[in-house]
Image (cartoon, grey):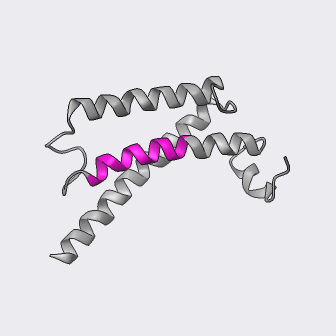
Amino acid sequence: MSVKNPGSISIFQVGNLSQLQTIMFLQLVAGGHLLLFVTRQTRWFFERPFPAPILFWAIVITQIFAACACYLGWFVPRISLWMICEIWIYNIAWMFILNIIRMIIEKVQK
């Protein structure tokens, strides 16, 4: 399958469209779960009250499975471990940014 914008894919060193689809899959899985931590309380996501253990471990196990699936090529085309780390760094950075934006909006609305 041809890539419509090969320049943007080469920036991220993605070899083909199927790898890009795997990257998007992992980004959606990781980003969606991390967003749960941001939206579940009115302060910082790493402050008390912490999420219930069942929620926390369900997310951890799902993330491990998704990362393994992407690295080992289970159900999706394989991507490198470095790319998986880049996706996680990206999502964690956005987790902090979104938390700051959410707290500013809540402060303005009061």
x 22%, y 30%: residue: 53
Residue 75 found in image quarter: top right
Query: Which residue of the protein is positioned furthest toward the right in this rendering?
Result: 2
x 72%, y 44%: residue: 13
Q: Position of residue 91 (x, y in %)?
A: 46, 47
Residue 86 found in image quarter: top right
Q: Position of residue 56 (x, y in %)?
A: 29, 33
Count all numbered tags in the image, as a single digit. Answer: 0
For residue 15, side relative to residue 105 (left or right): right
Q: Is residue 38 magenta?
A: yes
In the image, 29 versus 9, the foreground residue is: 29
For residue 96, side relative to residue 45 (left or right): right
x 18%, y 39%: residue: 50
Q: Is residue 86 magenta?
A: no
Q: Magenta segment range?
A: 26-39
For residue 107, side relative to residue 75 (left or right): left
In the image, 60 versus 47, the foreground residue is: 60
Q: Position of residue 79 (x, y in %)?
A: 66, 33
Q: Position of residue 36 (x, y in %)?
A: 32, 48
Q: Main secondary structure of the magenta part?
A: helix
Q: Give the quadrant of the C terminus.
A: bottom left
Query: Which residue of the protein is positioned furthest toward the front in this rendering?
Result: 75
x 49%, y 26%: residue: 65
Residue 25 found in image quarter: top right
